[in-house]
Amino acid sequence: MNFELSQDHKVLRDSVRDFVEKEIKPLAIKIDEDHKIPEELIGKMSAMGLMGSYVPEEYEGAGLDMLSYAIVVEEVSKACGSSGVLISAHTSLACDPIYRFGTAEQKSKYLPDLATGRKIGCILLTEPDVGSDVSGMATMYRREGDEFVINGGKTFITNGACLGTGILFATHDKSLKHKGISAFIVDLKSPGVTILKNEKKMGIRGSYTTAFAFDDLRVPVANMLGQEGQGFKIAMETLNGGRIGIASQALGIAEGAFERALAYSKERKQFGAPICDLQAIQFKLADMYSRIEMSKLLVYKAAWMKDSKMNYAMESAMCKMCASETATYVTKEAVQIHGGYGYISDYEVERMYRDAKITEIYEGTNEVQRVVISKMLLA
Amino acid sequence: MKILICVKQVPDMESRFKPDNAGVWFSDTDLAFRMNEYDEYAVEQAVQLREQLGDAADLTVLSIGPDRIVEALKKALAMGCDRAVHIQDPAAALKDPWQIAAIIAAFAKDKGFDLIFTGLQSQDRGSAQVGVTVAERLGFACTTTLVGFAFADGVITAKRELEGGVKGVVKLRTPALVTCQLGLNVPRYPTLPNIMKSKKKELVTIPVADLLHEEALAVTARFYPPAKKGGGIVLEGDVGDMAEKLIAILKEKTNVLR
Ligand SMILES: Cc1cc2nc3c(=O)[nH]c(=O)nc-3n(C[C@H](O)[C@H](O)[C@H](O)COP(=O)(O)OP(=O)(O)OC[C@H]3O[C@@H](n4cnc5c(N)ncnc54)[C@H](O)[C@@H]3O)c2cc1C
């Protein structure tokens, strides 16, 4: 048994870390304030290869493994949770299903643009009345000749306003529940697509969370992803892998907040000594670090299991649940260690606290993760 | 054009250094390592030269040390070097610059290298002797402290940094060795696709005993942290007084307020 990263993974981690330190970290406050990740930064992340880490080389990705991808999202999220989810939603929720379920033509048509960041990907599953229970989907499709015509709306779509390539889910008969759902690859610049709004949010403010309306959106028949009626299965399997991405984002946010809290506890003096001399602070640091390490082991294990072609459904649910709860816990304590300064934006831990919360909610709420885990335990 | 780049892996300079058991160097347990900063400039310059010359250039990167230094070699490969040579030596840290230079020269001899890039010095030992000694042993032309580099028609034009910001320009023919300084270039990040491609590049391992036939000329007798001093000057009084005192100190001890 070996818990050490390989030399190749260390080279990757250090390279991404250097990149993040110089290119992303200085922008993180502005990204939060502007509610936008600058195009220029997306360009740099793309040039660095961060948008296609585990897309195979034949589709212009880097061809690395899932563990490399987890490390990328983790390192980026240490500095900026918004940039972390940009990469995670794009890779896990758009590139991944196309690679896994797409035809040869679909892969060569869509993956190169995605893997190089020329287009940003997203998944369109959630609707105003459809959250944890996807089977009640109301967005409808019907076939007309060589096209599918889609009507309805989606909400809370990460990366939506980038108007790149979307994996859109719709039903042709609501009464069929999940059996009626199919998946489509759509170009969000097509006629019939309207942005209703970009949500204002508690955290990850640099990440777009977009509501769309579809009014006779026409999609070529060739753009159905997988078989007709296979949409629910595609969604569930996609979210399975995606949870590793969100867990990595949560892990990174926790580590970013911890680094700051540790440094601050050594610098800040009260009662004539650094506050890290106080046992109250020391115990917080010990708890925070232990939970981070626990989450990291689970995240890396889930990634390793996916790389090893093992069934990782339970591990991905556990790592998402643990890492996200670690992130909310650690960021909360990081604010506390900073005292009043923790509440002030310049110190960044308040942003991390806000950013952390969403990781307990999206890609399956933690309640849903517990349902998934316990179902498997009791099966 | 055959180019050799010599790199060293050094501890992250923000590490806390502790003496090793023998008290002659730092202990390397619990340290994070990375490529020596000056060597990154050397690798970058070599890769830029290859971009200029195209396939006519062939870049070999070399490093001496224990297995962990392969990470530095892999980084150089991912930045664009073509092949790597790991001279395996678990005790490299105990060798003096003369021996390190002798190992590199023994490797490079008769291999037909036209140009060797090294860092100006290592961030940990800081002798600044290895590059120039390699040049001497190979009979190469040599110049140091590069902040600018150009190559045309077999002639290198090197801009050097001299004391107090003064610059000098040196021209030299190949075969030559140059040592690189901060300001020469901005090293590129190894991109993910290039990290992947580098996994397929050649990496040769050579035991140090095959190349080292020199005794040390100098040994490090002791390695120790500086004695703890008091924590600087603490100014007291009201803000106005403190500002006056600070200005006086800055005027007396520095040239920022002249
Ligand atoms: C910032 C942001 C980005 C998002 N990005 C995307 C995206 O890119 N694409 C996309 O399709 N969606 C996206 N979503 C939607 C997200 O995945 C859903 O919000 C999430 O799945 C929960 O659905 P809901 O909000 O409808 O909550 P609900 O499902 O209504 O849940 C409400 C509460 O009930 C609990 N609950 C529900 N069912 C159960 C159950 N069976 N057992 C126990 N408890 C249960 C939940 O855990 C929760 O506490 C995003 C959401 C946000 C806020």
Image (cartoon, rainbow, N blue to C red):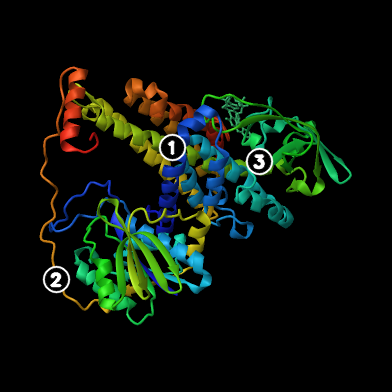
Question: Is residue B184 shown above or below A353?
Answer: below
Residues packed near mark 1 inside 10 Å, few (<14), some (14 to 19) or many (20 plus): few
Question: Which residue type carries mark 1?
Answer: Pro
Question: Which residue type carries mark 3?
Answer: Ala
Give the percent coordinates (x, y) of residue A40.
Answer: 55, 42
* Residue for badge 2: B217
Question: Is residue B137 shown above or below A154?
Answer: below
Screen quadrant of the N terminus of chain B = bottom left
Give the percent coordinates (x, y) of residue B103.
Answer: 27, 74
- Identify the mark at residue A26; answer none if there is no mark: 1
Res. A149 image quadrant: top right
Give the percent coordinates (x, y) of residue A167.
Answer: 69, 41
A190 left or right, relative to A253: right
Alpha carbon of mark 2 to alpha carbon of mark 3: how far?
Answer: 68 Å
* Ligand 1 placement by image quarter: top right
Question: Which residue type carries mark 2?
Answer: Leu
* Residue for badge 3: A235
Cβ–Cβ below 8 Å for labels 2 and 3?
A: no
Cβ–Cβ below 8 Å for labels 2 and 1?
A: no
Residue drawn at the location 52% of the way across and 51% of the way down:
A48
